[in-house]
Amino acid sequence: MRVLIAEDKRSLAGHLGQALEREGYQVKLAFDGEEALRLGRTAAYDVILLDVMLPRIDGFTVISRLREARIGTQTIIVSARDSMRDIVYGLDAGADDYLTKPFALDVLLAKVRAAVRRVPVEAQTEMRFEDLILRAQHYEMERGGRTAQLTRTECALLAVLMRRAKTVVPHAVLIDEGWSGEAQVSYDSLYVFIRALRSKITHPGEAELLHTIRGVGYSLRSEGSA
């Protein structure tokens, strides 16, 4: 498994790289955003650890451009910017996880393990519900003649909802299947991803398909269906 670490503090980057290499990962370091973007676009990595405050190009821009280029590599933002606004912004930009500094090394290693063990979303090439189509292999959904790119986590969550369409999927099930049982994921993080999914699934004038069942979970179903 290959990990790209984008971190401008060379001592920290080296420390993380050594820790990951001891765990058996192949590690590449990038010390600015331009290098991180160039390497990330090769899609040669299984996980990217991405600082936000990078020289030349900031981490938020790096992840946004990777997703625009349809690069679905698991990306964990690792940053001292710990406000809820920054976390939401990073996840909305396409990150799969967000870890704030300072952090325990064991927590970071656990998040990397969780990222690399996530099973690729459905082997089937296409899933359908009503007029919604999910092409999991391309991290892409289609509805009403328009297409939208999905992050790996958004794709995994939508696949769970589509497999269980017309039923209520509890929060815990979505977290377990969407993140392969990673215990660190909160309901707040799930909400951020569901909100992003809903904005891609339903545009103004379209029937709502993704419904919130307060206190329980979410359901993919037609409006008015029981």
Image (tube, rainbow, N blue to C red):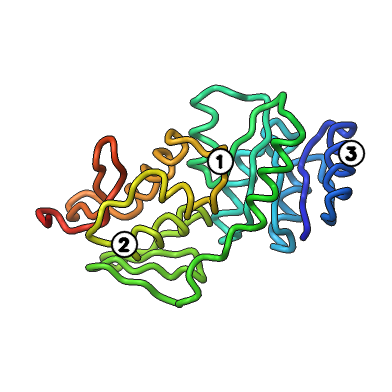
The vertical placement of 221 against 90, above or below, is below
Which residue position is annotated with label 2?
Answer: 164
Q: Earlier in the sequence, mark 3 or mark 1?
A: 3
Q: Residue at x 43, y 41 (%)?
A: 190
Q: Position of residue 108 (x, y in %)?
A: 71, 38
Q: Name the quadrant containing residue 127.
A: bottom left
Does 190 sit left or right of 218 as displayed?
right
Q: In front: mark 3 or mark 1?
A: 1
**Which corner quadrant holds the C terminus?**
bottom left
Q: Position of residue 56 (x, y in %)?
A: 74, 37
- SS of the residue at dot 2? loop
Amino acid type of the residue that numbered disc 3 sits on in the rendered structure: Gly
Q: Quick check: 142 left or right of 91? A: left
Residue contact at pointers 3 and 2, CB within 8 angstroms:
no
- The secondary element bearing badge 3 is classed as helix
Question: Residue 156 at what x, y percent from top left?
Answer: 47, 58
Q: Position of residue 172 (x, y in %)?
A: 41, 44
The quadrant in which residue 1 appears is bottom right
For disc 3, the marked residue is 14
Q: Is residue 79 above or below residue 5?
A: above
